[in-house]
Image: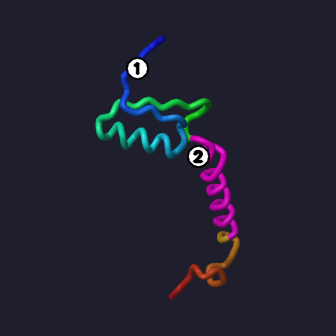
Amino acid sequence: MAEFDVDLFVIGGGSGGVRAARIAAGYGARVVVAEEYRMGGTCVIRGCVPKSCLLLDRTSTARSRTPRALDGLSRR
């Protein structure tokens, strides 16, 4: 069986796991990250971030169709 000399073994390559690994590596730790599928995790790949982008696009489109004086963006 192989042996590995690491200081931190992170289970999960989601935003929290990657952040923990980067901080530890920044302090000089030898880090290994184990991820089953793709780095980034559910939130980044198909959850929170894509949903936020879609909502932002939707509100931007709605604002572009509304006269500035009516949506509160024009303040003089």
Q: Distance between the residues labelled 2 and 1?
A: 29 Å
Front residue of 62/48: it is 48
Determine which residue is flagged by label 2: 44
Q: Judge left or right: residue 18 versus residue 40.
A: left
Label 2, residues with CA under 10 Å away: few <14, some 14-19, many ≥20 = some
Q: In this view, does 67 lie above or below 49?
A: below
Front residue of 60/9: it is 9
Determine which residue is flagged by label 1: 4
Q: Is residue 45 above or below residue 48?
A: above
What residue lies at 66% left-to-right and 54% top-to-bottom?
A: 51
Question: Which contiguous range is marked in magenta?
Answer: 41-62
Counting from the top left corner in percent of width and height, residue 11 is at 52, 34
Counting from the top left corner in percent of width and height, residue 39 is at 55, 36
> Considering the numbered disc 1 on the image, is that residue within a helix, a strand or a loop?
loop
Q: Is residue 42 magenta?
A: yes
Counting from the top left corner in percent of width and height, residue 21 is at 42, 38
Q: Nearer the viewer, mark 2 or mark 1?
A: 1
Q: Is residue 70 above or below residue 3?
A: below
Which callout, 2 or 1, points at the residue further toward the start of the chain? 1
What residue lies at 62% left-to-right and 55% top-to-bottom?
A: 53
